[in-house]
């Protein structure tokens, strides 16, 4: 576990404790989290890897995958009904739980999808199951440096991320959202939103205690200010407890480019 100081704390009933941390602790935590997800050092054998893959395949029936998929399917339906395709770009796509959820809703035809994922076995598994869609080995830092040349499938209507941005520090998330805004006019996210309007000062880096016993601390982002700074506005928020822990404070949020919303 990254060694971080957790002294400025806020407790809210029914959800994870929140802490403000220093910039240097944030750097250490992000490096730790990134290594955890990218290297997966705990998965030493093929059996370990298979367990991770099958676990994420099964997640497509959980509410936190189904509700975003329903939202995306609803946005896509009129575009596809008019003979178009609907582009979705995802970061932290694992082995495709979103596409599986769309498939189970019979909403996959007409979806033009690109996923980015740093853990190589997820990408291999994705490619085996969805040969007609693209997933690439890429992390947040890779994405931030990409351009339109990397995405012949662009533009995308929606940028999607589910319990992925909470793994990344605020500077990285802001840069990812800014990059995504070059390709997409709308965001659908499922994430921890307890710091969406505070309670901390928006300049503070805030983490939440996902699991004290396993020392898992993730970031609680101030999405309201991130999107406002980019010229986007949060237009919907559907509270949805975390599927594994049952903790409150998570939601599916949709954010739309303000200039487009004003035109609609
Ligand atoms: C909790 S899993 C969620 C996976 C998937 N989005 C889902 O809906 O099940 C977090 C995902 O974030 C990815 N991830 C973690 N850190 C990342 C980073 N720095 N850049 C890109 N992806 C990252 C992980 O590899 C993993 O696939």
Image (spheres, grey):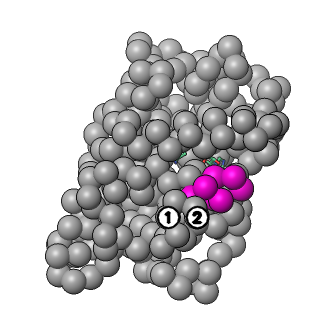
How would you classify the magenta stretch by its main secondary structure? helix
Q: Position of residue 212 (x, y in %)?
A: 65, 16
Residue on which disc 1 sits: 130
Which stretch appears magenta? 120-126
260 left or right of 175?
Answer: left
Q: Is residue 246 above or below residue 119?
A: above
Q: Are marks 1 and 2 in contact (CB under 8 Å)?
A: yes
SS for dot 2: helix
65 or 51: nearer the viewer: 51
Write the residue at 28% across / 40% down.
238
- Provide the secondary structure element on which disc 1 rests: loop
Relative placement, left or right, of 190 versus 41 is: left
Mark 2 closeness class: few <14, some 14–19, many ≥20 residues within 10 Å: some
The disc at residue 57 is none
The reply to whether residue 166 is in sight is no
Residue under pointer 2: 127
Q: Which image quarter: residue 13?
A: top left
Q: Confirm if mark 2 falls within 8 A of ligand 1.
A: no
Locate residue 176: give its quadrant: bottom right
In this view of the protein, which residue sits in the foreground, 256 or 113? 113
């Amino acid at each position: 576990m990254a060694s971080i100081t957790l002294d400025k704390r806020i407790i809210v009933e029914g959800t994870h404790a929140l802490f403000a941390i220093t910039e240097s602790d944030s750097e250490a935590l992000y490096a730790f989290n990134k290594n955890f997800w990218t290297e997966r050092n705990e998965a030493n054998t093929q059996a370990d890897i298979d367990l991770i893959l099958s676990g994420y395949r099964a997640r497509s029936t959980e509410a936190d995958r189904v509700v975003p998929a329903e939202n995306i399917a609803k946005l896509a339906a009129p575009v596809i009904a008019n003979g178009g395709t609907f582009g979705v770009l995802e970061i932290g796509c694992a082995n495709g739980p979103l596409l599986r959820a769309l498939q189970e809703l019979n909403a996959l035809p007409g979806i033009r999808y690109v996923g980015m994922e740093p853990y190589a076995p997820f990408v291999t598994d994705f490619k085996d199951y969805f040969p007609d869609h693209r997933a690439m080995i890429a992390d947040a830092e890779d994405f931030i440096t990409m351009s339109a040349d990397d995405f012949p499938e662009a533009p995308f209507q929606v940028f999607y991320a589910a319990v992925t941005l909470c793994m990344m520090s605020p500077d990285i998330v802001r840069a990812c959202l800014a990059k995504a805004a070059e390709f997409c006019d709308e965001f659908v996210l499922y994430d921890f939103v307890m710091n969406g309007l505070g309670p901390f000062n928006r300049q503070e880096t805030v983490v939440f205690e996902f699991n004290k016993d396993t020392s898992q601390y993730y970031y609680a982002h101030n999405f309201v200010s991130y999107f406002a700074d980019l010229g986007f506005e949060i237009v919907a928020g559907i509270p949805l407890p975390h599927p594994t822990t049952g903790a409150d404070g998570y939601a599916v949020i949709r954010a739309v480019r303000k200039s487009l919303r004003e035109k609609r």
